[in-house]
Amino acid sequence: MQAVHGFITEPLEPDGAGDSAKELIDEFFASYAQLQRQVPSYGLPWFLERKAFVVNNAPNILCLSFASSSFMGGAHGNATIKFENFNPRTGEPIELADLFVSGYEGKLLPLTEARFREVRAIEKGMTLADAGFSFSETGSFTLPDNFAVTENGLTFYYNAREIAPYALGPTELTLSYQELDGLMKE
C-alpha cells in the first residue's frame, strides 16, 4: 500500500530524497555525520523507528496507525502517531465528514470537548488556555484531523506539541458509537 511505503520512506527533511528505505538510511547517517563535523565532541547516539499497524480491518473501513519515534539530538526524543482511514474497496481516504450526517459539527464538537476536558482533568469553568492548551487563534476547541475508526468507537489523537507544550504530552480520547448515535452515517 502506498500510504505505508510513503510513511516508512518519508525523508527527514522536506527537501530530502525519499523513495526508498536506503535513501532514508543514507540521509539519516549523513545528517549525523554532518553534526559530528560541526561539533566534534558530539557523541550521543541517534535512532529512528517507524512502524505501521492495522487498527481496524472491516469491510467498509481500513484504519492504519503510523507510529514514529526518534532521537536526533536536542533536549528529548520525539514520538508521533498518525491515523489514516481508507475505503478498502477503492483505496480512497476517509475524512471525518465522510462518516457523519450533515450538520454534525454542532453536536460533535461539544461532545468531544467534554471528553477532552475529562481525559485531561480540566476543572469546570477553567479555560483551555489556562489549562495549558492552545487549539486556535481564538482559543476555542477544535477537532484534529488525526482520528481512528476503531471497533469501539472514534478515537481522536493530538500529538505532543500539537496543542500544548511537549511536557503535557499527547492526548488520546475515544467516543463510543453509542455516544455518537444519530451523528454517524450508517
Image (cartoon, grey):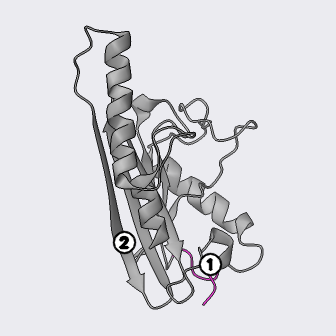
Place of residue 32 in the rendered image (x, y in percent of width and height, measured from the top left): 33, 26
* Mark 1 and mark 2: Cα distance apart in space: 17 Å
Residue 155 in sight from this viewpoint? no
Badge 1, how many Cα within 10 Å: few under 14, some, many 20+? Answer: some
Q: Secondary structure at mark 1?
A: helix
Q: Nearer the viewer, mark 1 or mark 2?
A: 2
Place of residue 74 in the rendered image (x, y in percent of width and height, measured from the top left): 37, 21
Badge 2, how many Cα within 10 Å: few under 14, some, many 20+? Answer: some
Q: Which residue is denoted by mark 2 in the rendering?
A: 55
Q: Which residue is denoted by mark 1 in the rendering?
A: 99
Count of numbered circles in the view: 2
Q: Amino acid at mark 2?
A: Val
Residue located 47% across and 60% down the image: 6
Q: Which residues are magenta?
A: 179-186
Residue 137 in sight from this viewpoint? yes
Instruction: Say if the magenta span includes residue 181.
Output: yes
